[in-house]
Amino acid sequence: MVRHPNAGAVLVIGLGCENNQVAAFRETLGDIDPERVHFMNCQQQDDEIEAGIEHLHQLYNVMRNDKREPGKLSELKFGLECGGSDGLSGITANRCWGVSLTT
């Protein structure tokens, strides 16, 4: 989601004691726009709520003037994953996606 083109800005939050550390996750992302993607480790903050709000204000100020651009529906691409949730997703979800994408 961090690199998704429709995400105007992203705040990645970690507690600091989880297996997937924010710093390690950040390294996997490669080149990102630091004005639009912020990272916060809660255990490194005196007040994580206040710090999070400050990050969100900064991100909002960067993206608040972004404009939507018209595009063709025929150029829209979907990425699907089968079986990610349970054994029935391939039976139920794929049929729904198939019908919606062909109509």
Image: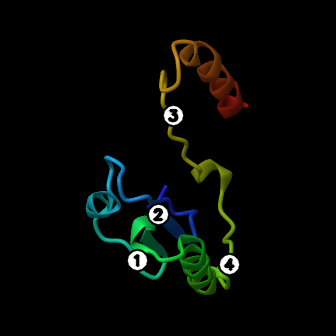
What residue is pinned by disc 4? Answer: 67
Name the front one of labels 2 and 4. Answer: 2
Query: 9 or 5: which is nearer to us?
Result: 9
Q: Give the spatial CA distance, label 3 vs label 4.
A: 27 Å
Tell me the crowding category of disc 4: few under 14, some 14 to 19, or many 20 or more residues within 10 angstroms, Cα based.
few
**For the point 59% across and 12% down, which residue is it?**
91
Q: Give the spatial CA distance, label 2 vs label 1.
A: 13 Å
For residue 24, side relative to residue 82 (left or right): left
Q: Position of residue 64 (x, y in %)?
A: 67, 82
Q: Give the spatial CA distance, label 2 vs label 3.
A: 24 Å
Q: Position of residue 88 (x, y in %)?
A: 57, 13
Residue at the front extreme of this rendering: 46
Does the CB distance between marks 1 and 3 fall below 8 Å? no
Name the image quarter holding residue 32.
Answer: bottom left
For residue 12, the mark is 2
Q: Quadrant of the C terminus?
A: top right
Q: Give the spatial CA distance, label 1 vs label 4.
A: 18 Å
Q: Earlier in the sequence, mark 2 or mark 3?
A: 2
Q: Earlier in the sequence, mark 3 or mark 4?
A: 4
Q: Earlier in the sequence, mark 2 or mark 1?
A: 2
Q: Give the spatial CA distance, label 1 vs label 3.
A: 26 Å
For residue 33, the mark is 1
